[in-house]
Image: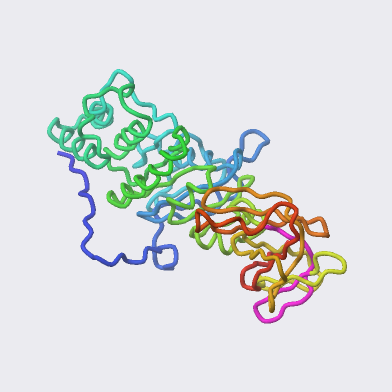
């Protein structure tokens, strides 16, 4: 009789730091070694190396056509690798059909059977494995409880909401206790508020089951919310693989910086490196601007880009005393987003920079308005100088 692994139980009140990727002795659950996938003359994935560890919630993030879904389909066994290897627990998956891999995939459409109840949809894969009825019943009830749908067990898919359908599809995918669950844009069909709520549900379920999740998404906010690590892809290659906070605060290049969140990018040439600060010439007749220097530091005169997040830029009517970096411009536009306001400021050089302020007081009048001349300033540590 087949038995499924029990749900992990939390025994410590203080969460341990989870970072197997930082341990050189840790063995990856999944490893891509020089993986390439071609469709005719088109290269969808190009010589990719990647390690994903057990119990990770890993996100493949990038625009349409970057290769993230192709990567997932090769892992699931729906596409063959052109070159390289994909290993699962050290075993080469070449030639292993999808139904013999300890991997389940949850599609964006959910693919629920409309004529079956919620209970029967979850039980479907277990029945195909010809498991005993009592084992199936026990597992289905466990999954219903996990996704909080016990009282909807006898309803058909058309009788439940979009968010509930998503949870049924997740329960069905987890019912067979796969080592790895692949999620292809799983929240794309939900409205924004429900999608945000479901993100936290997914995180809770992944933590309870201990299953390794790999999610494909083009939604940066989704990836940054749910994932332990994020791989940012472009044109079949990895631009950066790191934790969400590192990708946001220390992007590897201008592409990653621009893809994740709002950013001001100022191109220029390296003027000098002073300790941890790099300064760049960015416009004729203007004082050089500074940010954290890249390592290793580029040579003087080399092309660089200053990246600075709008929330790290201070806006004021007067030039702030002692500011490491200060530029003057005129407010061209203001975007009111409820919790924050974003100011678009045009400099005399033609550059447009954005600064954000938090709206903490409902009755406080806006301090700055359209057409006003203002100063933008930031510390040297607020900006980041990137190569290229």
Q: Position of residue 302 (x, y in %)?
A: 79, 68
Q: Is residue 229 left or right of residue 118?
A: right
Q: Residue furthest bottom?
A: 275
Quick check: 261 above or below 181?
below
Quick check: 285 above or below 228?
below
Q: Position of residue 255 (x, y in %)?
A: 66, 53
Quick check: 376 above or below 86?
below
* Residue 343 location, quadrant: bottom right
Q: Specify start and end residues of the magenta stretch as a single range.
A: 264-280
Q: Position of residue 180 (x, y in %)?
A: 36, 45
Q: Quadrant of the N terminus?
A: top left
Q: Is residue 154 left or right of residue 232?
A: left
The residue located at (34%, 45%) in the rendering is: 201
Q: Residue furthest right?
A: 285
Magenta segment, principal secondary structure? strand
Quick check: 204 above or below 304?
above
Q: Nearer the viewer, residue 41 or 335?
A: 335
Give the colouring mode of the picture: rainbow
Q: Does the rendering let one see residue 370?
A: yes
Q: Quadrant of the C terminus?
A: bottom right
User: Is-magenta flag for residue 270?
Assistant: yes
The residue located at (71%, 51%) in the rendering is: 370
Q: Nearer the viewer, residue 364 or 346?
A: 364
Q: Nearer the viewer, residue 17 or 330?
A: 330
């Amino acid at each position: 009789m087949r038995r499924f692994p029990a749900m992990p139980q939390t025994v410590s009140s203080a969460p341990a730091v989870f970072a197997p990727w930082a341990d050189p002795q840790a063995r990856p659950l999944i490893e891509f070694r020089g993986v390439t996938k071609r469709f005719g003359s088109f290269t969808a994935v190009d010589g990719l190396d990647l390690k994903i560890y057990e119990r990770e919630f890993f996100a493949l993030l990038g625009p349409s056509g970057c290769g993230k879904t192709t990567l997932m389909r090769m892992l699931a066994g729906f596409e063959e690798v052109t070159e390289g290897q994909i290993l699962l627990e050290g075993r080469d998956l070449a030639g292993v059909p999808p139904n013999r891999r300890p991997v389940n995939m949850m599609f964006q459409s959910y693919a629920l059977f409309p004529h079956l109840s919620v209970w029967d949809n979850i039980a479907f894969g277990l029945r195909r494995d010809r498991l005993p009825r009592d084992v199936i019943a026990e597992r289905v009830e466990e999954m219903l409880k996990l996704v909080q749908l016990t009282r909807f067990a006898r309803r058909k898919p058309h009788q439940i909401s979009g968010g509930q359908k998503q949870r049924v599809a997740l329960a069905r995918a987890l019912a067979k206790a796969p080592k790895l669950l692949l999620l292809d844009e799983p929240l794309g069909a939900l409205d924004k508020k429900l999608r945000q709520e479901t993100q936290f549900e997914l995180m809770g379920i992944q933590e309870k089951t201990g299953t390794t999740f790999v999610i494909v998404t083009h939604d940066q906010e989704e990836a940054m919310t749910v994932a332990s690590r994020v791989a940012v892809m472009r044109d079949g290659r990895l631009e950066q693989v790191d934790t969400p906070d590192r990708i946001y605060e220390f992007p590897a290049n201008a592409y990653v910086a621009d893809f994740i969140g709002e950013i001001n990018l100022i191109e220029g040439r390296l003027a000098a490196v002073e300790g941890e600060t790099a300064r760049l010439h960015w416009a004729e007749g203007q004082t050089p601007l500074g940010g954290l220097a890249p390592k290793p530091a580029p040579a003087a005169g080399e092309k660089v880009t200053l990246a600075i997040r709008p929330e790290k830029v201070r806006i004021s009517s007067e030039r702030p005393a002692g500011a490491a970096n200060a530029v003057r411009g005129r407010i061209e536009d203001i975007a009111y987003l409820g919790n924050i306001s974003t100011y678009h400021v045009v400099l005399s050089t033609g550059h447009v920079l954005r600064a954000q302020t938090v709206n903490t007081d409902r009755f406080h009048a806006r301090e700055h308005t359209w057409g006003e001349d203002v100063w933008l300033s930031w510390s040297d540590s607020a900006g980041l100088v990137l190569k290229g």
